[in-house]
């Protein structure tokens, strides 16, 4: 009872100090605080203070434990070091692409996140029940009319009875851009040109692997809308990169699965069937519309001054082009980032309830991901996450950092997608993966990607350069 009481007093003291200071400042300056001021000074600032105190205590405890372990090892007899287990089979990341708030490209978004310039803003069109603008993660220059014109003929020919909402049109516009960019990367497959030439000449084509196009769409889309959207994205891939005859049958129920386990299932199935794996995983979605705002507000889950633990609407699209080792070796780029098997689990209780628990689950999964890849925690150069601004998610994430990556600098080596871009569901998770692979591709070193945006699903995966091309381990400087 005493530890619980002391922690409660610390939290109460932090909030009381920040609140009293803010009220005194506003009264002294005769300033009327706005919504942003209330959120920053009455919620985010005390939470940051609590997290700093908690993190400092953990670091002190870890330093003490390390000192004790060093002393014990110095007096113990030398033991034979067991040989390291070979790393698990990994997938090659051929390419990544995204369209998100603050960035139409991976490098642009990463720079915005690292420079702390990627801030959520009040939406110019969306209002809450009280008539005030809400915070959102809106992608600029989404042309719904152009997307409708592009799809009009195809939609009338294949899904004439399907009608998309404004939010769905925004998602399709963003997803089409990502699908086009990734499909163009398939030109590097050496078997593609001979296959295409043989088909055009009316000759028997040489073998060409099947391409899986996996579209992760919002769960609230109707089946007819989902079927039409997946068909359109497959059409885009066939139009710009891969023959339609070599597209694997679509997976329509993947919206109920998290991205990391789904990728693992596809890889395991390909290995069991002894088939090559070539996969385009794409997530697109948008909550930038009155329908989402009204639904979230009605459920009490929209972020505002009355619901500081609510969600901030976001949108975007992100995708990865993945291959097994044999298919990856066929491409000209021999230094492709590798994605090792992910560690995933479900929480016993929702992270959105008052009794959250399971704070240590994410740390355990991160340790498993590091062990699976055979990478030391000290060598992690970047951590990416789909976490948003909610205290439950940030507390869980920072607890994982303290327990698993004590040498990581969250200010310089941590990218949180949804906290800066709003909640876009599976898009936030895939975008975190895209950011992680880009860090590896740029030579920064191994990157760990974790997911804790969902109320239940937790996961971690390690991405690194192939052996022989990895960045040198970090060394201490005097």
Image (tube, rainbow, N blue to C red):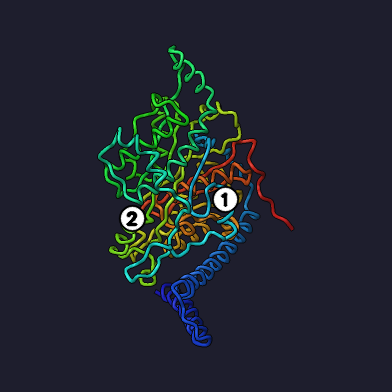
* Residue 308 x, y percent position in the rendering: 39, 69
SS type, badge 1? helix
- For marks 2 and 1 on the same chain, the one whose residue lies earlier in the sequence: 1
Q: Quadrant of residue 245?
A: top left
Of labels 2 and 1, the one closer to you: 1
445 with respect to 129 (left or right)? right
Q: Which residue lies at the image location 42% right of the left edge and 38% below the top edge?
A: 264
Position above or below: 284 against 401: above
Between 141 and 92, the residue placed more toward the observer is 141
* Residue 19 x, y percent position in the rendering: 47, 80
Between 154 and 407, the residue placed more toward the observer is 154
Q: Which residue, given by chain and number where applicable, does mark 1 sit on?
A: 108
Position above or below: 379 against 38: above
Q: Which residue, given by chain and number where applicable, does mark 2 sit on?
A: 348
Q: CA distance from mark 2 to mark 1?
A: 37 Å
Q: Residues within 10 Å of mark 2 (few under 14, many from 20)?
A: few
Q: Is residue 368 visible?
A: no
Q: Residue furthest top?
A: 203
Q: Residues within 10 Å of mark 1 (few under 14, many from 20)?
A: few
* Residue 366 x, y percent position in the rendering: 48, 50
């Amino acid at each position: 009872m005493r530890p619980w009481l002391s922690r409660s007093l610390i939290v109460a003291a932090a909030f009381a100090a920040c609140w009293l200071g803010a009220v005194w400042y506003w009264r002294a300056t005769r300033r009327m605080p706005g919504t942003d001021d209330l959120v920053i000074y009455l919620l985010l600032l005390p939470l940051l203070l609590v997290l700093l105190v908690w993190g400092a205590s953990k670091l002190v405890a870890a330093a003490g434990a390390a000192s004790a372990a060093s002393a014990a090892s110095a007096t113990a007899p030398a033991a034979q070091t067991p040989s390291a287990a070979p790393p698990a089979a990994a997938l090659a990341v051929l390419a990544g692409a995204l369209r998100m708030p603050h960035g139409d490209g991976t490098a642009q978004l990463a720079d915005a996140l690292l420079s702390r310039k990627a801030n959520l803003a009040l939406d110019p069109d969306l209002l809450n029940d009280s008539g005030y603008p809400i915070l959102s993660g809106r992608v600029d220059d989404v042309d719904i009319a152009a997307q409708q014109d592009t799809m009009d003929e195809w939609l009338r020919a294949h899904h004439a009875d399907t009608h998309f909402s404004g939010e769905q049109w925004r998602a399709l516009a963003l997803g089409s851009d990502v699908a086009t960019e990734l499909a163009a990367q398939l030109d590097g497959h050496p078997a593609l040109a001979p296959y295409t030439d043989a088909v055009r000449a009316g000759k028997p084509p040489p073998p060409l692997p099947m391409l899986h196009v996996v579209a992760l769409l919002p769960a609230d889309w109707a089946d007819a809308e989902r079927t039409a959207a997946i068909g359109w994205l497959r059409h885009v891939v066939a139009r710009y990169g891969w023959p339609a005859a070599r597209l694997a049958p679509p997976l329509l129920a993947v919206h109920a699965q998290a991205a990391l386990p789904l990728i693992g299932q596809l890889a395991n199935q390909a290995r069991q069937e002894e088939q090559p794996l070539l996969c385009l995983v794409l997530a697109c979605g948008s909550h930038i519309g009155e329908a989402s705002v009204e639904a979230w507000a009605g459920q009490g889950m929209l972020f505002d001054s009355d619901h500081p633990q609510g969600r901030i609407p976001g949108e975007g699209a992100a995708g990865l082009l993945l291959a097994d080792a044999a298919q990856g070796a066929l491409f000209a780029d021999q230094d492709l980032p590798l994605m090792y098997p992910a560690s995933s689990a479900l929480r016993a209780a929702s992270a959105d309830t008052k009794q959250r628990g399971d704070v240590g689950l994410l740390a355990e999964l991160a340790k498993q991901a590091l062990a699976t890849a055979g990478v030391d925690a000290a060598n992690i150069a970047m951590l990416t996450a789909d976490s948003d601004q909610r205290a439950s998610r940030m507390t869980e994430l920072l607890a994982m950092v303290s327990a698993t990556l004590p040498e990581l600098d969250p200010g310089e080596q941590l990218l949180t997608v949804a906290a800066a871009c709003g909640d876009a569901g599976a898009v936030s998770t895939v975008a975190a993966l895209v950011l992680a692979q880009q860090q590896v591709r740029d030579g920064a070193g191994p990157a760990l990607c974790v997911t804790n945006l969902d109320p239940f699903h937790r996961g971690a995966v390690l991405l690194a350069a192939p052996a022989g091309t990895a960045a040198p381990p970090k060394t201490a400087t005097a």
